[in-house]
Image (cartoon, grey):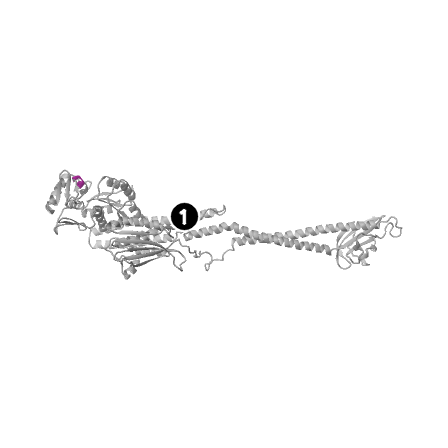
């Protein structure tokens, strides 16, 4: 195990020519939530301000009505002598001092209903007219109008009969203060809602991040399987996406089953072809002659071809397998013990030194195939000793962690030329030693498939030193 | 030397039997796992050639059953599945060597020879006893360097005695290791062969131990 950080980038997305990636799910969720909450808050703001204004107007009207009633009370005077307006006098002593201040914004007028002439007017009007919409047939009318200074005023007009004479009393007050109050309220509401909205969007962002976290966990888990760090995806996920993990695991399993089935078929094919080939070749050798020689030669070619294509089929099948790894030490231990049984009686000692904990990032069978061929080959040629050594590598500049498997024998070894030849496909360096397919080329092919390599070198003892470099976890 | 061949392919079986017989072995044959297991369980073989892909009972189980019941004869497995996991499984089950199909008969003969020889404790392909030299690879016998001609039964007898030289071998044991299963066994014929062999290699080489059997060469322990 290495402590090096895993820097290999997963190959997702941004391949050239790939379709533009969809906006992220969390971005989409946050955007939608932000849009609707902003909209909702703006509408809420308008409603709040509208309600506040309506309430303010009602209060204003109530105040105007109080003033109007006061004016009416001050006006009615049974003692007032006849004339044009019997029982009516100019209202005095109004409690609102602003009616007396010139152009204060607070005004009142009294006129006879059927005449346009003003009977009485507040001193604040200082002779200016207070132009209001006509009352018409209505008993009472309130609304907005323009005051003598072109300021906006709110007015209330009532038709009231005194001594059977109908009068129209109008009261008006400037709305500047009221307007100011409403817009101040609107500003406060706006600020409050803005803060509230920002908090809401933040909360949504957090919620989305937290809510979608299982998805990134799923992605990491899947990536680990693809890299061979895990055998299957962690299914401990929320109810909504757990089925996805289960399905993915089923897919991974089915992938492995397909590979296994392919291998079984390959094995069956091998079994089916190899026995008849043995028969043909042996029959030919038992009956020497030109025909026999031809048959033997062709059988040998067929046998090589079968082996070659079966190996290729196996490799093609296993390239698609994902998420497998195996512990190196037990595989080698089992192989070395088996070889020892066979070779110890030939006086060959096998020594294995492998630390526990190194895991090969690939199929156990392929590790068996590679190390089995190399160890068997070493044993066939060794004089007395074969050593098998495993070591973790920390190659600088290499993103993946690797381990090396070195197999040395003290046999005659190979020349540099022979070493080069040996790794080429299907070479048999020595046809006289039975079963010496060497198999080194198969090992080299398999190692290359895993992104590793096979180097042949001269051992210190003069024999062959085979060094296999393979990816580890 | 008596060999059991367990192979379901009748052609290959025939070829193996022919080649092994030619090489001087008494050969019995079985065509499926159960038959093979029974024969290996009840007859004393000097080696077994066992195919792994067998009908009725697979080779691996046959081998495991033998080993579990204490049968220790050397076993050479033949396998078309030449993956290492299969080979290792065979060796773990108790095989002494393996040959992957397709094979050349010479390879099987060499492996069988080596297994029989090593089981008797001989390191080399040449076994000598006094002036007698047995070349296992060539199947040739020389006395004082002069080649002598032996019939197949004489060769088997000498080979068995040479492999187990210094030990007393009973007539029954000789009978069991010299003849195929179907052969009409008569222990008197062993006497006849011993007599002929003595004439060819020298009468003092094979000693008759009364009531026990025969011994080739000097006595050793066990």
Q: Is residue A234 above or below residue A456?
A: above
Task: Report the side of A213 relative to A470 (left or right).
Answer: right
Q: Indicate whether residue A54 is drawn in magenta.
A: no
Which residue carries the number 1 mark? A253
Q: Quadrant of residue B215?
A: top left
Mark yes or no: residue A288 visible. yes
Q: Quadrant of residue B183?
A: top left
Work out which residue is located at the far top of the displayed protein and give it: B211
In percent of width and height, residue A163 lies at 85, 48
Mark yes or no: residue A302 visible. no
| Mark 1 Cα shell of 10 Å, populated few (<14), some (14-19), many (≥20) | some
Closer to us: A330 or A15: A330
Work out which residue is located at the far front of the displayed protein and give it: B221
Q: How many marks?
A: 1
Q: Main secondary structure of the magenta part?
A: helix
**Secondary structure beneath label 1:** helix
Subunit bearing disc 1: A
Task: Report the side of B173 relative to B58 (left or right).
Answer: left
In percent of width and height, residue A251 lies at 42, 48
In percent of width and height, residue A329 lies at 35, 50
In percent of width and height, residue A463 lies at 27, 57
Task: Report the side of B14 relative to A310 (left or right).
Answer: left
Q: Is residue B191 above or below residue A325?
A: above
Question: The magenta stretch spans which residues?
Answer: B171-175
């Amino acid at each position: 195990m290495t402590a090096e950080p895993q820097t290999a980038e997963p190959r997702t997305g941004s391949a050239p020519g790939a379709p533009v990636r969809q906006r992220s799910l969390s971005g989409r969720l946050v955007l939608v939530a932000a849009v609707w909450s902003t909209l909702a808050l703006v509408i809420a703001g308008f409603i709040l301000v509208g309600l506040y204004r309506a309430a303010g107007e009602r209060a204003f009207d109530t105040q105007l009505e109080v003033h109007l009633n006061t004016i009416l009370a001050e006006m009615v005077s049974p003692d007032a002598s006849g004339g044009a307006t019997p029982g009516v006098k100019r209202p005095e002593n109004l409690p609102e001092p602003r009616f007396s201040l010139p152009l204060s914004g607070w005004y009142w007028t009294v006129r006879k209903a059927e005449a346009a002439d003003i009977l009485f007017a507040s001193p604040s009007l200082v002779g200016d007219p207070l132009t209001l919409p006509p009352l018409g047939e209505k008993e009472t009318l309130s609304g907005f109008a323009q005051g003598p200074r072109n300021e906006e005023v709110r007015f209330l007009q009532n038709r009231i009969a005194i001594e059977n004479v109908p009068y129209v009393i109008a009261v008006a007050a400037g709305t500047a203060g009221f307007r100011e109050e409403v817009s101040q309220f609107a500003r406060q509401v706006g600020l409050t809602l803005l803060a509230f909205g920002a908090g809401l969007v933040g909360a949504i962002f957090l919620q989305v991040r937290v809510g979608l976290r299982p998805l990134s966990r799923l992605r990491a888990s899947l990536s680990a399987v693809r890299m061979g760090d895990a055998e299957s995806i962690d299914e401990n996920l929320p109810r909504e996406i757990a089925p996805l993990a289960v399905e993915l695991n089923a897919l991974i399993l089915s992938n492995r089953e397909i590979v296994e089935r392919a291998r079984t078929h390959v094995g069956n094919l091998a079994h089916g072809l190899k026995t008849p080939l043995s028969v043909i070749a042996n029959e030919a050798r038992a009956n020497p002659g030109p025909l026999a020689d031809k048959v033997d030669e062709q059988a040998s070619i067929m046998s090589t071809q079968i082996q070659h294509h079966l190996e290729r089929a196996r490799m093609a099948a296993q390239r698609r397998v994902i998420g497998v790894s195996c512990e190196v030490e037990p595989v080698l231990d089992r192989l070395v013990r088996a070889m020892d049984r066979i070779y110890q009686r030939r006086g060959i000692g096998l020594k294995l030194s492998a630390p526990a904990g190194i895991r090969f990032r690939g199929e156990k069978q392929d590790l068996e195939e590679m190390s089995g061929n190399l160890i068997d080959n070493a044993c066939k040629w060794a004089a007395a000793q074969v050593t098998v050594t495993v070591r973790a590598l920390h190659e600088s500049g290499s993103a993946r962690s690797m381990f090396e498997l070195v197999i040395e024998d003290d046999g005659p070894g190979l020349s540099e030329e022979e070493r080069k030849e040996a790794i080429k496909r299907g070479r048999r360096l020595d046809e006289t030693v039975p079963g010496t397919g060497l198999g080194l080329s198969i090992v080299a092919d398999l190692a290359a498939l895993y992104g590793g390599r096979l180097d042949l070198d001269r051992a210190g003892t003069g024999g062959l030193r085979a060094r296999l470099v393979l990816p580890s976890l | 030397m008596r060999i059991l061949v367990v192979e379901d392919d009748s052609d290959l079986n025939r070829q193996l039997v022919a080649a092994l017989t030619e090489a001087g072995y008494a050969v019995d044959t079985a065509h499926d796992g159960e038959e093979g297991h029974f024969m290996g369980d009840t007859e004393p073989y000097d080696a077994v050639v066992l195919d792994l892909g067998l009908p009725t009972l697979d080779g691996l189980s046959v081998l495991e059953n033998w080993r579990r019941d204490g049968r220790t004869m050397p076993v050479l497995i033949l396998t078309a599945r030449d993956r290492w996991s299969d080979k290792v499984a065979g060796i773990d089950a108790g095989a002494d060597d393996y040959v992957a199909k397709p094979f050349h008969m010479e390879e099987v003969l060499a492996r069988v020879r080596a297994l029989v020889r090593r089981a008797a404790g001989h390191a080399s392909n040449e076994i000598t006893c006094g002036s007698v030299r047995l070349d296992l690879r060539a199947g040739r016998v020389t006395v004082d360097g002069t080649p002598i001609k032996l019939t197949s039964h004489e060769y088997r007898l000498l080979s068995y005695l040479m492999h187990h030289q210094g030990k007393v071998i009973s007539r029954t044991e000789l009978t069991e290791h010299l003849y195929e299963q179907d052969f009409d066994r008569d222990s008197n014929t062993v006497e006849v062969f011993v007599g002929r062999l003595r004439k060819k290699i020298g009468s003092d080489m094979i000693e008759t131990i009364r009531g026990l059997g025969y011994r080739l060469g000097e006595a050793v322990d066990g």
